[in-house]
Amino acid sequence: MIIHLPKKDAPSGRALHADEWVDALWTPFAPEDERIPDKVARRRHRLQRLLREAREQGGVPTYQHLAEALGVGLRTIERDMASNK
């Protein structure tokens, strides 16, 4: 899946210009995901992969990007991110 993300160094607090975005290739599903029986652990594993892929490609996803890619709500992403701190 190709996702349009703000660049790592893009400023916040204003609308971004066209050159402040990057198209990143995400892998929302991978074969190893199915080896994780617990659905919460599997989702968090997928979340970490999406974050890593975005970072490697110079992008920074919003919680909304992550929620849409994983098919969950914003509150779920907020909880998952809080559990990783």
Image (tube, rainbow, N blue to C red):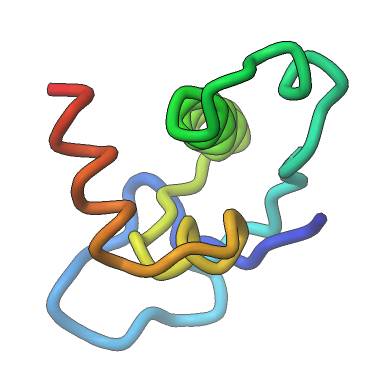
Identified at 72% across, 43% down, the residue is 28
**Is 28 placed left or right of 12 in the picture?**
right
- Give the farthest residue toward the bottom: 15
Identified at 69% across, 50% down, the residue is 24
- Which quarter of the rendered picture does the C terminus lie within? top left
Q: Hey, which quadrant is residue 64 in on the image?
A: bottom left
User: Where in the figure is residue 56, as x and y percent of width and height?
Assistant: 57, 26
User: Where in the figure is residue 40, as x and y percent of width and height?
Assistant: 44, 33
**Is 4 placed left or right of 64 in the picture?**
right
Q: Where 31 sits versus 14, above or below?
A: above
- Which quarter of the rendered picture does the N terminus lie within? bottom right
Q: Nearer the viewer, residue 16 or 71?
A: 71
Q: Hey, which quadrant is residue 54 in on the image?
A: top right
Identified at 24% across, 63% down, the residue is 75
Total numbered badges shown on the rendered structure: 0
**Is 44 placed left or right of 10 in the picture?**
right
- Give the farthest residue toward the right: 31
Q: Where 4 sits versus 30, above or below?
A: below
- Give the farthest residue toward the front: 37
Identified at 31% across, 87% down, the residue is 15
**Is 77 placed left or right of 60 in the picture?**
left
Q: Where 3 sits versus 50, above or below?
A: below
User: Where in the figure is residue 55, as x and y percent of width and height?
Assistant: 49, 32
